[in-house]
Image: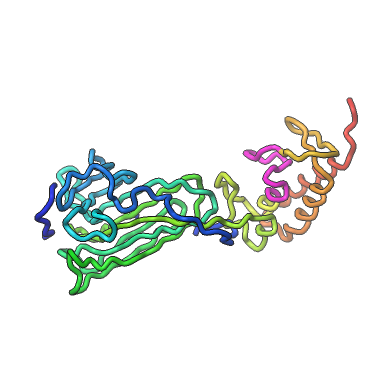
Amino acid sequence: MKRRFLGGAIVAVVAAIALPVAALAGGDVSNGSFENGNFNGGGYETLAAGTATAGAITGWSVTSGTVDWIGTYWTSEDGSKSLDMNGTATSEVPSTAGTISQILATTVNNKYVVHFFLAGNPTCGPSTKNLIVSAAGAAPQNYSFTNTSTTTLTNMGWEAEAYSFAATGASTTLTFSADPSNTSLCGPALDNVSTTETVAAVATGADCKRGGWRTMFEPDGTPFKNQGDCVSFYATSGATPIGVPGRPASSFSGTPSVAGGAGQHTLTEETMGAIGRVAASACPPCEDRAADARRARLQSVLGEARRPVLAA
């Protein structure tokens, strides 16, 4: 049984041409060492999903099962608190394997590395404890910690781990989950969570080639449909003049003018030349018929752009 005498009661997306140009200091994770919140003191407290205790740890939420918020029960890796991801079952929540999550502010296509420390409750359960880490839009990953004869409550043997993902939206839910197959009261121990961010290099239309479009996104996180869609987007600096739904209107300046749609778009000769060159070279063969149709419409717009606009 779980011997506790002192206390109270589970994300690369893909990176859009992930060429790192700068590493920024972490800090996106709030309260990564679980120091802050409504802790009543003592060895540990059980927090259960769907109850008033689920949000007791500042910045985090228990979203399924139970976790034990550790105080003096064992020696934490950082500060005075940490988590046992297998909590103590309650009458309201009989499951011991718990899940916690936090919503992070992220930038589309930037890469994030989640750093954390892992150990395992040595007092019961299987010797190997498994922790599943996931982030929205990225595949989950399993991490294991195996207790040995030297692992004790005062010598937990904390090990540094890392999980990476590329953001697909302005916010990303980071999740840590205990292995549901471990139904004991003693699970993986978690502490000292932090992040670092790597800014993705600015993508261009050339990056759409050779299947690159499959791992690229528009600034709002919308994936490209095919290579032609991707090329068209970058050729017009994100302002497609061919009426693609959901895209902003062109904002180029210069002459000549192109009439059509709800308003008029103006293109410079330099821009028209760039569009023509990219559209002509980036699509052989195009991914599908939709790309061919899009390219034809783009060429039609270019043809119209070279004609003078007659006064009414």
In-image side of 254 versus 124 (left or right):
right
In-image side of 257 versus 142 (left or right):
right
Q: Is residue 262 above or below residue 236?
A: above
Q: Is residue 243 above or below residue 14?
A: above
- Does residue 13 appear anywhere in the picture? no
In the image shown, does 52 or 58 lie closer to the viewer? 58
Asked if residue 233 is among those painted magenta in the image, a careful observer would answer: yes
Which residue is farthest left? 5
The residue that appears at 32% across and 62% down in the rendered structure is 117
Where residue 238 sits in the image (x, y, percent)?
67, 45
Which residue is farthest top? 312
Q: Quadrant of the C terminus?
A: top right
Q: Is residue 289 above or below residue 77?
A: above
Q: Report the colour scheme.
A: rainbow
Asked if residue 65 is among those painted magenta in the image, a careful observer would answer: no
In-image side of 259 versus 68 (left or right):
right
Where residue 271 sits in the image (x, y, percent)?
79, 47
Q: Give the image quarter of residue 280.
A: bottom right
The residue that appears at 31% across and 50% down in the rendered structure is 100
- Does residue 220 appear anywhere in the picture? yes
Q: Quadrant of the N terminus?
A: bottom left
The residue that appears at 16% across and 57% down in the rendered structure is 73
Magenta span: helix, strand or loop, mainly?
loop
Where residue 187 sits in the image (x, y, percent)?
23, 60
Where residue 23 sits in the image (x, y, percent)?
52, 59
Which residue is farthest bottom? 149
For the record, the magenta segment spans 232-249
State the count of labels: 0
In the image shown, does 45 or 166 lie closer to the viewer? 45
